[in-house]
Image (cartoon, rainbow, N blue to C red):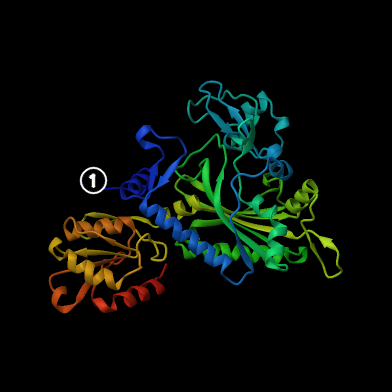
């Protein structure tokens, strides 16, 4: 008997087989660093985003929603510093011509690339992981933004950029938000949307991609309150990860050194997740200071500030919790991916997702196809408007395993006795225990189990 192990190869193969993630453009050989989400992936992502939005924007903080355009004026990116500063420093292997970020091959932190010469590269770098040589070109800067052609009219075409982050759409709408909501400090703006970065080195499945979705909040407050809200938001980030099923022991909070900070940040904490390929950034919490509102005020000649009690203009401080949707999904699925050996020495693959995040809360499985119409009419009617999966093909044991592998918490079996006793057998995914439940009680039974689920 072949026994499986928990590793990235088995993990990614499994996610494809059950319908979470597919390779982009697969039938044409695939397009590097692009991924499509199938039914289970799309449903789980929607739940992640809904929980995130509810946790932050509908919670105890004063937060408004925003959905800004992917396409922004070049003036936005020029003022924000992205055109001049949003770049990676790359070296190329002279032997195999593969490119790497300098920090990925360096044995020590690189604070200033101006001091790097051929001798420094020999003494302070590792071998190329592709060809095992140590023959590097000198570092070169590479801007990460995607250029696209933007047609003003038939005869006038400009180069503009796809946004590399969602945040700037909030900053340039600061006055619109304040005026339309009549709000006062402190307040925040939450946004979920696509961003694009022309990453040269993409790797590790959906961890680092050129097209990705962000969940970000820009929290505006007075300077005296910045540290307090920084810690409040850090706690809310941790509690969000717990809500979606990421284990506390899988996370580490890392404070960036001064040389690691982005050009807009005065302080940044990375929340690292212990992936199979290393402990890497899952989310970030940055104190952006007053940088963004100041630079856009100056460049646009607009007053992107507020008045204090003395009727004096000032720029609010900005705290930014930033999450990647794909990285959150990857972390949730990896932390809940289990390969169990049962008493009969067989194995089962099971995704022990919290019911609140699972793509479907239950599966309806008629014991025989002959019972299909009864199951649909009686059970599905009671569970109307809940995300319920239906399957009637294969033995009941094999169907149980398929639902386990998809992460569906409960299997509801409609058998021949159900016709007379109006009850069904409900199987728990995690314990595999079964209970006989009246069909009329199913909705409240599942609601209670979801509410009292122990992560």
| Depth order, front residue of 352/425 | 425
x 40%, y 70%: residue:
454
Residue 407: quarter of image:
bottom left
- Asked if residue 105 is positioned above or below residue 429 in the image, the reply reads above
* Quarter that holds the C terminus: bottom left
Visible in this render: residue 443? yes
| Depth order, front residue of 291/10 | 291
Expressed as whole percent of the image width and height from the top left, the position of residue 395 reads 16, 58
Expressed as whole percent of the image width and height from the top left, the position of residue 84 reads 71, 37
Expressed as whole percent of the image width and height from the top left, the position of residue 391 reads 23, 59
Image check: 114 left or right of 50? right
x 36%, y 61%: residue:
352
- Asked if residue 147 is positioned above or below residue 385 in the image, the reply reads above
Circle 1: element type: loop
x 22%, y 58%: residue:
399
The residue that mark 1 highlights is: 2
């Amino acid at each position: 008997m072949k026994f499986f192990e928990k590793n990235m190869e088995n993990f990614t193969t499994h996610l494809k087989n059950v319908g979470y993630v597919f390779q982009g453009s697969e039938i044409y050989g695939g397009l590097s660093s692009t991924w499509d989400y199938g039914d289970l992936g799309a449903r789980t992502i929607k739940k992640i985003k809904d929980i995130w939005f509810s946790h932050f924007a509908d919670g105890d903080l004063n937060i408004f929603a925003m959905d800004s355009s992917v396409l922004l004026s070049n003036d936005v990116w020029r003022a924000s510093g992205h055109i001049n500063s949003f770049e990676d420093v790359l070296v190329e292997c002279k032997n195999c011509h593969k490119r790497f970020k300098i920090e990925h091959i360096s044995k020590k932190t690189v604070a200033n690339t101006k001091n790097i010469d051929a001798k420094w590269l020999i003494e302070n770098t590792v071998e190329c992981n592709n060809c095992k040589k140590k023959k590097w070109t000198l570092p070169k800067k590479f801007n990460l933004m995607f250029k696209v052609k933007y047609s003003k009219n038939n005869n006038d075409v400009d180069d503009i950029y796809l946004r590399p982050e969602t945040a700037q759409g909030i900053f340039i709408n600061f006055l619109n938000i304040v005026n339309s909501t009549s709000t006062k400090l402190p307040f925040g703006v939450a946004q979920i949307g696509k961003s694009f970065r022309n990453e040269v080195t993409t790797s590790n499945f959906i961890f680092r991609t050129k097209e990705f979705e962000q969940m970000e909040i820009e929290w505006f407050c007075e300077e005296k309150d910045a540290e307090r809200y920084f810690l409040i938001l850090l706690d809310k980030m941790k509690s969000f990860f717990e809500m979606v099923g990421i284990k506390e022991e899988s996370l580490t909070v890392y404070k960036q050194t001064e040389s690691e900070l982005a050009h807009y940040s005065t302080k940044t904490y990375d929340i690292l997740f212990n992936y199979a390929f290393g402990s890497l950034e899952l989310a970030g919490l940055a104190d952006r200071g007053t940088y963004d509102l100041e630079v856009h005020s100056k460049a646009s000649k607009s007053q992107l500030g507020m008045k204090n009690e003395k009727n004096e203009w000032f720029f609010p401080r900005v705290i930014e919790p930033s999450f990647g949707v794909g990285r959150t999904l990857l972390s949730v699925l990896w932390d809940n991916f289990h390969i169990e050996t049962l008493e009969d020495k067989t194995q089962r693959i099971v995704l022990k997702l919290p019911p609140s995040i699972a793509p479907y809360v239950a599966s309806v499985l008629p014991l025989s196809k002959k019972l299909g119409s009864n199951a649909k009419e009686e059970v599905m009617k009671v569970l109307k408007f809940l995300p319920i999966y239906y399957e009637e093909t294969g033995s009941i044991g094999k169907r149980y395993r398929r639902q386990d592998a998809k992460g569906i918490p409960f299997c509801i079996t409609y058998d021949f006795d159900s016709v007379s006793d109006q009850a069904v057998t409900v199987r728990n995914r995690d314990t595999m225990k079964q209970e006989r439940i009246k069909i009329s009680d199913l909705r409240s039974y599942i609601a209670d189990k979801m509410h009292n689920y122990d992560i």
